[in-house]
Amino acid sequence: MSSIKVIGGGSLKGELTIQGSKNAALPIIAATVLNKGLTILKNCPKILDVFHMIKILKELGCSAEWDENTLIIDTSKLSSAKVSESSVRKMRSSILFLGSLLGRCHEVSIAYPGGCSIGKRPIDFHLDSIKRMNVSQEFLGEDKDIIYCRTEKIVGTDIFLKFPSVGATQNIILTAVLSEGVTRIFNAAREPEVLELCNFLVEAGARICGKGTAFIEIEGVKSLRDVEFTLSPDRIVTGTYMAAVAAAGGDVILQNTPVNQLDSVIRVLSKVGCDIKTGANSLRVKCDKRPLPIEVLKTQPYPGFPTDMQSQLMTVLSLADGKSTIIETIFESRFQNAYELKKMGANITIDEKEKKAVISGVKKLKGATVKAHDLRAGAALIIAGIAAEGTTIVKEADTIERGYEDICRDLGSLGANVSFCSENIL
């Protein structure tokens, strides 16, 4: 596994362009199998999670090729409705093929997803909802961890989600697109990535109302058509680089940003002392002083503050001039990064029962050897390294490549001393 070496000191300055959205790309790639033809995805990020979804497409008999950051997918020769167990174990987003393969083939075989470093993330909401759409389910294998679903026809119905799960909402939509009748989702997830999936499907001929709201209605159609679609920029990558400026200081312009998706992040970073100016699709972040604390910050489903930005904000608040509290309401194991930050001198107390982190800001962090427990935690540790004194080594940095095309290139273009290295230098 690779590591990332960060030599701290100095502020960030410059301009960079934000990559396409990871969390929009993954469900849309799964959705391409609903059309028996060609899909052209522009502004698609070249990241490990996208490469993994492409590998699954090829296992199913489809083809995919790149033209710079345009991904061209041909699903006309799909020959299997079985997603390999190893594929689902590697990446939880593979479960999105459950709905799309069921919609296309009326059957699917897929493994139950394995554990996740940031929490359990069960798929009960997915399975319970799809079962209501005239779909039978069997659990096969020695451990009953292979899900086999089949149906003579998918029938639209009303579905009430107990929690606005992004993955469950997306799988219901994918199942319903080629169904008979109308499916209505109550308490649907409102994350931009759900809206993006709906926009893609509508462009391909689906009939969906209520996009971007908690009530989504899908009227089944007979088939979809070939489509060319441009993915929106990545809101979490944008937020990550904004947090880097908040922690290390500087003046940075971010181009190709989804400004309208960043209200909660902009609001929080403004509170910690950043001067943020927004344009139509760009923003400028300036910070020339020590961050201010936040009394209580709670992660919430969209449009609340995203759990995917919690680790980055913890790094910022570890340097704040006062005490802050973060309450994590989405994933029960997302405070693992606190123990890595403490190796760098952060003063953080974790209450696992209350899912609460109390952060007493310190004036300086010091370089250390730390471990990336998950994608966003790894990015947060790089931010900590930029703001720290001395050298920081972030081990198991491969996980960061799941969501960032080249975080070293991007932050390096802003003046940070960040580079990939081999663990044998340690």
Image: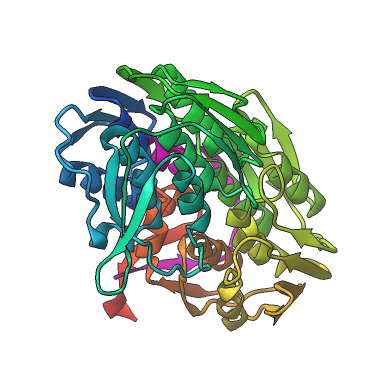
Magenta residues span 1-29
Q: Is residue 362 visible?
A: no
Between 351 and 180, the one nearer to me in the picture: 180
Residue 12 belongs to magenta span = yes
Question: Measured from the top left, where is residue 65 in percent x and y?
Answer: 20, 33
Residue 113 location (% of width, % of height): 38, 62
Q: Quadrant of the N terminus?
A: bottom left
Residue at horizontal 65 percent and vertical 52 percent from the top: 162
Q: Residue at x 47, y 66 (%)?
A: 374
Identified at 81% across, 51% down, the residue is: 271
Q: Is residue 269 magenta?
A: no
Is the image coloured rainbow, by chain, by secondary structure, or in one colour? Answer: rainbow
Image location (x, y in percent) of residue 423: 30, 76
Task: Give residue 393's quadrant in the image.
Answer: bottom left
The residue positioned 41% from the left and 36% from the top of the image is 175
Q: Is residue 343 above or below residue 83?
A: below
Q: Nearer the viewer, residue 316 or 326?
A: 326
Residue 189: quarter of image: top right
Q: Is residue 314 left or right of 418 when viewed as pictured?
A: right
Q: Relative to 353, does residue 7 appear above or below in the rendering? A: above
Q: Nearer the viewer, residue 200 or 164?
A: 164
If the image is split into quadrants, where does the C terminus sit?
Answer: bottom left
312 horizontally vs 218: left or right? right
Image spot of residue 101 (x, y percent):
30, 40
Q: Is residue 371 visible?
A: yes
